[in-house]
């Protein structure tokens, strides 16, 4: 076989492989898909759990995880941080008016959903102790949330902090309401 025929065969094989991959809409665990998606696709059994892993491993946060995925924010929650996330429970999402979550999860509402999810994150480490000492925390959206302490209860924009979990890249504060950013 001539070299030109071998080269043509290689080019044809690569072309067919690329065409097959580009028509697939499903996520893949292949190394190429991991490079395209980012750090959120990396899984190991050795590293400490980051904020995304904490949420994924919590049965009470499956709705939040679905919203983070729909908004394509998984990689943000796996970055080195530090980052503090106020994580609404599934019950918190159920408190939204009927149909709100379904509407937000539609692809055409991705930017609105991303703004809402981003409003739940703050750059920096605010653990369960030092969150109580601040009046307001600047969120990733540029807006602030108000922190109030009433006895043993800490509230963020009226949402009660139910628990706090340390992650490798910051803190997750479990809250009982979905925080909505101010209208702009």
Image (cartoon, rainbow, N blue to C red):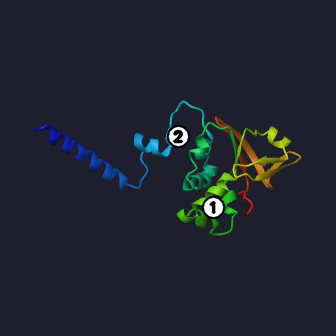
Vertical placement of residue 132 versus 105, above or below = above
Question: In the rendering, at what x and y percent does residue 174 appear?
Answer: 71, 48
- Within 10 angstroms of label 2, few (less than 14), some, or many (20 or more) residues? some
Q: Residue at x 85, y 41 (%)?
A: 133
Q: Under tag 1, what secondary structure?
A: helix
Vertical placement of residue 45 versus 72, above or below = above
State how far apart marks 1 and 2 are (Cα): 24 Å
Q: Residue at x 24, y 45 (%)?
A: 11
**Residue carrying label 1:** 112
Task: Please tell me the numbered disc located at residue 46.
Answer: none
Q: Under tag 2, what secondary structure?
A: helix
- Within 10 angstroms of label 1, few (less than 14), some, or many (20 or more) residues? few
Camera-nearest residue between 54 and 17: 17
Camera-nearest residue between 169 and 91: 169
Question: In the rendering, at what x and y percent does residue 23 appear?
Answer: 35, 56
**Residue carrying label 2:** 39
Q: Is residue 119 left or right of residue 36?
A: right
Q: Is residue 149 left or right of residue 93?
A: right
Residue 138 visible to an observer of this rendering: yes
Vertical placement of residue 74 versus 101, above or below = above
């Amino acid at each position: 076989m001539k070299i030109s025929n071998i080269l043509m065969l290689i080019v044809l094989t690569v072309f067919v492989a690329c065409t097959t991959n580009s028509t697939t809409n499903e996520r893949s665990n292949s190394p190429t898909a991991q490079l395209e998606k980012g750090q959120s696709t990396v899984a190991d059994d050795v590293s400490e759990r980051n904020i995304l892993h904490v949420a994924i491993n919590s049965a009470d946060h499956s709705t939040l995880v679905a919203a983070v995925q729909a908004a394509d924010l998984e990689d943000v929650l796996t970055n080195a941080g530090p980052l503090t996330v106020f994580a609404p429970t599934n019950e918190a999402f159920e408190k939204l008016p009927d149909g709100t979550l379904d509407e937000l999860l539609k692809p055409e509402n991705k930017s609105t959903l991303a703004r809402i999810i981003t409003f739940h994150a703050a750059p920096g480490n605010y653990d369960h102790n030092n969150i109580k000492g601040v009046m307001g925390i600047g969120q990733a959206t540029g807006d602030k949330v108000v922190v109030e302490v009433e006895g043993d209860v800490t509230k963020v924009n009226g949402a009660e902090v139910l628990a706090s979990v340390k992650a490798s890249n910051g803190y997750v504060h479990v809250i009982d309401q979905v925080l909505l950013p101010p209208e702009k």
